[in-house]
Amino acid sequence: MRPRAVLPYGEAAIYLDLGLERARDRAARTHAAAALVRAALPPGALSEVVLGAGTLILAGIAEDARPAVDALLSRLSADLEPRAGEASSPAALRGREHAIHVVYDGPDLAETAAALGATPREVVALHTGREVVVELLGFLPGFAYMGDVAERLVRPRRATPRPSVPAGSVAIAGAFTGIYPMSSPGGWTLLGRAVSAPPLFDADRDPPALFAPGDRVRFIAVAPEDAGPPPPAARPAPREDRAPRALAIVAAPPGATVQDAGRRGMLSKGLPPSGPLDAVTHAAANLAVGNPSGAAAIEIPLGDLTLCAEGRVLVSIDGERPRTLHDGEALRIDATSRAVRYLAVRGGVGVPVRSGARATLLAARLGGLDGRPLRRGDRLPVGDEAEPAGPPADVGPAGAPAEGPTPLLEVDPGPHAARFPAAALDTLLETPWRISRWGDRVGVRLEGGRIPREGPDLALPAPMLRGAVQIATDGTPIVLGPDHPVTGGYPVLAVVRQADQPRLARLRPGDTLRFRLGH
């Protein structure tokens, strides 16, 4: 198996297209390739190997590991070829069987039937008429790509993703079908809703995801009156928050969360990294109070936050000179021209570590305070002051707005140039873009132009990284953030450099920016 393409994916990742689009054993061969890469490289050479359908990314490549990675890539095709006497391909993945009851009343069912020249009943028969197999996990925590659907059901992704798809939605895109584990943006065609599956992702379950590669799934149509009660949602773990010192939330803007440096090495398990939108300002606030740079702090997007100290605490806003709050003292952090601000407290915000970090991942209801945004009445325990790295540092305020009225952010070409017309990258670089109000920690849409596209979106799901500039079918650029989907189907035209991702995060809806190629 010779990789069809070996391409850079931003500054510290490599994208491998294994050329397996039509291989019947694509999933098994992709997993075998990932295992080979993991075994061949020394510990610490990269942060992880992330799978798509017939594609891999080697992410977080250490600078001193480049020679080892280059040597691996030079021999990869030979290592993946079967040797004499061996089977022509890896053994098929084996897994469990699942039966999922579905009420087929999705908003796209009638439109899909009309496009196929069929009735809705016939579309349901096509979807329930064959067993599908889980090829990989991606997109959202617990989301399983299951294929292949009946050939007549192969449909492109929507030209414009929906801002919100309800949890439990059963959908199709390309040759795959899947179930949305939680409410999220999405561009798949919605046929119905699952009514019998347990939570598709539960961080307190082992393993957290209900489905695994190789699992076999059959969908069973049921009438709404026969659906029964909805399955119980995963409950957050009980919290012990009676620490002697705390921050009590008096008022918070929508989307305020607890964020530490984020989860590392979890993309391969279906979890995006999370962590701060603006890592520079987050680190400055922590260092100002003597914390390690990645300690848990409060991220405050697009609004004011007011809190009250319980006990004596030392805090910093955005790396400004720290100040002491005495028991019962209130503090208001006002919104500024920056889109996001940070409040750090000496000792860090003492929420539990979940799946390797304290960072809030809203899509999975994981980390932070019960996996949700902060609100009035919340009490955030403050960690032990013995944990910080050192004395408070006079680092000065960080995260100043990008210079000039139109910041210029550096990008590298993305791995999917072949899926665009020749003028696409030039259009991205020459257009003044405006930050849309449709943005969150998953990604930010840009307005002001359209990137030329060719053909429908039927490509297989590919791994995604923070900073990737995906282009929707309608030509809209979407820059992925720290809670980005692990995989996606819209192609990546460019990747924002890591140093400029904080600058992007500081821009508010309506602000403008431009891109240029990095040097």
Image (tube, rainbow, N blue to C red):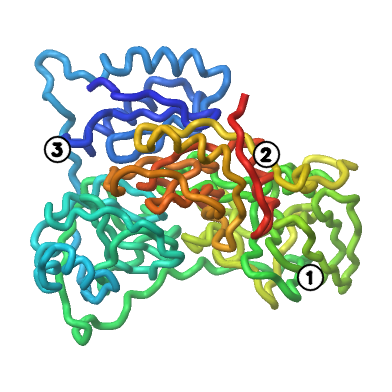
As helix, strand or loop, the secondary structure at mark 3 comes to loop
Residue 291 in sight here? no
Location of mark 2 (residue): 408
Instruction: Reply above or below: 279 against 173.
Output: above
Query: Residue 490: where, in percent of width, then height?
Result: 38, 47
Which dot marks residue 88? none
The answer to whether the residue labelled 3 contacts the one labelled 2, judged by CB atoms less than 8 Å apart, is: no
The residue that disc 3 covers is 24
Which sits earlier in the primary sequence, circle 2 or circle 1?
1
CB of mark 2 within 8 Å of CB of mark 1? no
User: Disc 3 marks which amino acid?
Assistant: Arg
Residue at x 29% of width, y 23% of height: 3
Q: Earlier in the sequence, mark 3 or mark 2?
A: 3
Kind of element beneath mark 2 = strand
Dividing the picture into quadrants, the one containing residue 502 is: top right
Q: Which comes sooner in the sequence, label 1 or label 3? A: 3
Q: Nearer the viewer, mark 2 or mark 1?
A: 2
- In the displayed structure, would residue 463 be above or below residue 204? above
Left or right for 96, reference 370: left
Question: In front: 310, or 449?
Answer: 449
- Structural crowding at the residue carrying mark 3, measured as other residues with C-alpha within 10 Å and reported as few (<14), some (14–19) or many (≥20): few
Image height of 455 relative to 171, above or below: above
Q: Is residue 291 left or right of residue 110?
A: right
Q: Is residue 405 left or right of residue 227?
A: right
Q: At 68% from the left edge and 70% from the top edge, which residue is drawn?
A: 253
Q: Residue at x 41, y 48 (%)?
A: 270
The label nearer to you, 3 versus 2, is 2
Query: Which quadrant, please, contains the C terminus?
Result: top right
> Residue 307 — which label?
1
Q: What x and y, as percent, mark residue 297?
A: 71, 55
Q: At label 1, which amino acid type do we have?
A: Leu
